[in-house]
Image (cartoon, grey):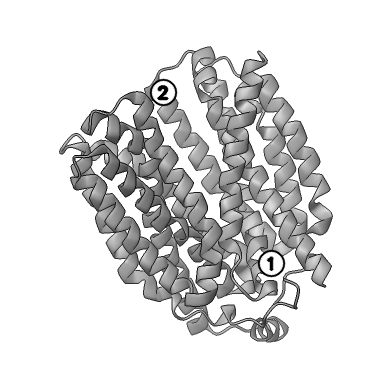
Amino acid sequence: MNDSLRAARVATFVYFSLCGTLMGTWVVNIPAIEERVDITHATLGGLLVLLGLGAFLGMQVAGRLTDRLGARVVVPATGVLCSVALVLPGLPRDPWTLAGALLVFGFCNGCLDVSMNAHAVHVEKAYGRPVMSAFHATFSVGGVLAALVGAATANAGLSPAAGMAATGTLGVVIALGSARALLPAEPVTADTDSASKTGHVSAPARRTTSGRIWILAVLALTVMLCEGAANDWSALHLKDVLGAPASTAAFAYGTFAATMTVGRLLADRLAARFGSMAILRHGAATAGVGIAIVTVSPWIWAAFAGWALFGLGLSGCVPQLFSAAGHADPAAAGANVSRVAGLGYVGMLAGPAVIGWLTHLVALNHAFVLLILLCAVTAVAAGILRADPDRKTEPAPSGH
């Protein structure tokens, strides 16, 4: 069991990295694809909504399939589908075809995202200690790999379609090659097993679990809205508000992303020692302090420090929410994760748009007050993670 569990954990790292690489490969090719299809930034923005819609739909479908068929079947299948679908956005030469390609790619990416997170929940349960944040850190590493590969293929003179096809082909091999290491069956708690045998789960229990899941989903929306805002507006803040050169402003997002990755690598150990509630509460509070510094500071160096704190604080929040959703009911881990991830993804997409709308009313840095408020709400509501009986698992065997 020791070796098989360790192999399952490594395989989960691989799938998270694969998902990050596939999405990152699309992102780094956006400028070239936009130029070839000959569309404006505004048109591209509308097309990206279809990418998000596809991802949301895929998450809902994959969540139920994962609960029914098992992650060992769904994760590699969606990994293959997402790898194949990656080439689609590189082929179109008109906006309508690109719209269809993005809808399909988003759907496949959403399927992979939820199924691998559901499997990560079961790995974490088997380990008996937090391991979710490290998986999310690996997703970020996949984005870095995509940037490096994208630069290499561009320097080699490859078209977006050729580069994306090469990455997708490698993705298919990786998805199939890692499948055997996944857990063959999800662990089920005694209570869940008893309920499945009797075929009876009390209505109050269902309502309590469902209500808790939707609270977790709303918190995921608030946290990921903050992440989405940082992705699109951090560099523009330094350039437009503080007057930094474009080359300097670009490091604002880099600082945010770097501390996000570092924080996720550290969050599991901190969660094991202090608990998930502490990670969410103090993380959201730290993020609130960071974005408050960004909002009021007139100095570039202080803005960098603020974005760094913002990323560090947010880093462990989403993994705790996904983990709590999966552990709330092991028999419905996929469906529950899909609800939390789906609403969170809506927040990720809405963040840039909401901040953009607010800039019509106030200055960009003043629009960030909304992010301060969202961080405060998340910190106050973090007590939802206090009652999580399913996470009181037995310690993992020695050697882990």
Q: Which comes sooner in the sequence, label 2 or label 1?
A: 2
Is the residue 334 above or below the residue 141 in the image? below
- Tell me the quadrant of the picture where the C terminus can be found: bottom right
Dot 1: what SS?
Answer: helix
Occupied quadrant, residue 281? bottom left
- Horizontal and vertical percent for residue 354? 29, 42
Residue 123, disc: 1
Label 1 amino acid? Val
Question: Where is mark 2, residue-wise?
Answer: 43
- Horizontal and vertical percent for residue 353? 33, 38
Label 2 amino acid? Thr
Q: Are marks 2 and 1 in contact (CB under 8 Å)?
A: no
Is the residue 361 above or below the residue 391 in the image? above
- Horizontal and vertical percent for residue 234? 34, 38
User: Can residue 123 be seen in the rendering of this structure?
Assistant: yes
Residue count near mark 1 (Cα–Cα under 10 Å), binned few <14, some 14–19, many ≥20:
many
Q: Residue at x 32, y 63 (%)?
A: 285
Is the residue 246 above or below the residue 353 in the image? above
